[in-house]
Amino acid sequence: MDLKAALKQYFKDHGDDIRQRVIDLTVEMCKHKTVNVVSEKLPEHPYLKIRGEEWRVAEIVKRELDKMGIPYEEFARMEGRPNVIGKIGKDANGKRLLMPAHMDIVPAGEGWDTDPYDVIEKDGMLVGRGTLDNKGPLASIMAAVEVLKKTGIDKELNGQLMIAALADEEAEDPDGIDYGIGFLMEEKHIAPTYSIIPDIGENMKAIDIAEKGRTVFKITAIGKQAHGSTPERGINAVYMMAKMVNEIEKLKFDYEVHPVLGHPSLNLGEIHGGAAPNIVPGTCMIYIDIRSVPGMIKAGVIAQLQGCADKVKDGKFEIKVMSWNEPHAISPKNELVDSIQANAKEILGFIPEPIGQGGGTYAKTLNLKGVMAVGWGPGDDNAFHVANEYVEIQQLVDFALLTCLCAVDLLK
Ligand SMILES: [Zn+2]
C-alpha cells in the first residue's frame, strides 16, 4: 500500500482515538494562562510573572514528544519563553517542512458563557481561550507526528518534518524584540524549505499566500505656541494638521493592483494635539497605519506623505516611520499549494483557494527570509480573539491527517 493510502486507512481505523487525543491535549494546554500582553499591561494580569509564560505549555509538548519517542530541540531567547521543535524524518534530501503553532494566547476578555480556561465540548466544538488560536491546531500537528511515528511512515520520509510550539506571537513590546519565530530565524536555529502556518481560520477553505506590508507612521505638525488670546502670534498646529489630514484623505498611492492583495489601505488611527483652551497648540500628532502591496517602497510612501505636507503652507511637518515591514506574496502555483489543494480536495471535498490578507502571520517572517510559507488551517476566522472562542473537533482531526499527507508529498 502506498504511504498516503496507509495514512488514510490508519485514520479510518483509529479515528476515535485520534479525536480523543486531540481533545485531551487541547483541554490540557488551554488550562494554562499563557497570556501574552505588552509589558506595560502586565500589572493587569497579576497571575503572570513574565509575558506569555509559554514554558507552561512547552512542558506538556516536551512530555508528549518524549512519550512518542520524537526528538526535539528547545531554543529560548529568555528563560520561561521557550520554543520547542520536534523533528521526524531524515533530513537527507535537504527538504524541511515546518508546521509552527504558537503557545501564547490573548487575554480572555469579557463576555464568556463558561470558564475560558476550562474547555468544554459542545456540539462538536471545543470552546475556550486558545482552542483555535492556537492550541487546538498545536494538538492537531502533535497528533499528526504521533501517527507518522506509530505507523513507521516517518522512516520513509527523506526530508524532515518539524512541528514547532512557539512563543510570542500575540503581542510585541515597543522594543521590537521577538522571542518566537523572529528569534529562531535571526539566530538560524531553523532553516525550513516549506512552512504551513495553521493560524488563519477560513475553515481550511483558503490558503494565505500573500500578506500586505504593515507600516505605521507618526506625523507631527510643528507650529508655534502662543497665548490663546493672541492667536495671530502663533502658528496653530491643530489647524495645520487639519489641512494635512485633508490631503491624506485625498492621497492616492502609486502602486499596481496586486492579483490577490488588491489595493493598499490607509487608516488614520490616532490624533493628539493641544494642551488647554487658552494655548495656541504648538504641536499636533497623528498616527497612520498603511498596509502596502508589493512594489510600494518606503522612500516612495514617505515622498508621497511629504507631498501632502508640502501643500500645507504654515509651519513644518515631521514624518517618522514607526515600523515598516514589507508585503510578501508567493505564486499560487507551486508544489506546496498543489499538495494542500490536492489533499484537501480528497479529504475535505473542496479545493482551498489562494488568498491574500491585510493582517500578518508567521508566513510573513518566513517568506521574507526566503521560505515558501503559507497560512492554512482549521477553524472559523470569526472565532479569533473573541469570547467563547471555539474550534470544530473534526477539523482538528482532519488537519492532522492533512498534515501527514502534505508531509509525505513534500518530503518523500
Ligand atoms: Zn494566532
Image (spheres, rainbow, N blue to C red):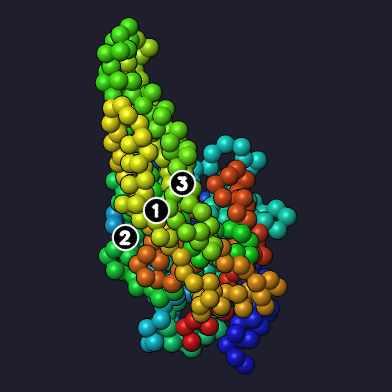
Label 3 within 8 A of ligand 1 by Cβ:
no
Which circle marks residue 187 in the picture?
none
- Earlier residue among tags 1 and 2: 1
How far apart are the two marked residues, 3 and 1, measured between alpha carbons?
A: 35 Å
Q: Which residue is mark 3?
A: 252
Q: Is residue 266 above or below residue 126?
A: above
**Front residue of this view, candidates 345 and 300:** 300
Q: Is residue 176 left or right of residue 196?
A: left
Q: Position of residue 267 (x, y in %)?
A: 47, 41
Which circle marks residue 168 in the picture?
1
What secondary structure is found at the residue carrying circle 2?
Answer: helix
How far apart are the two marked residues, 1 and 2, measured between alpha carbons?
A: 10 Å
Q: Residue at x 37, y 83 (%)?
A: 94
What secondary structure is found at the residue carrying circle 1?
Answer: loop
Badge 1 amino acid: Asp
Q: Is residue 13 visible?
A: yes
Q: Residue at x 36, y 49 (%)?
A: 301
Q: Residue at x 49, y 43 (%)?
A: 107
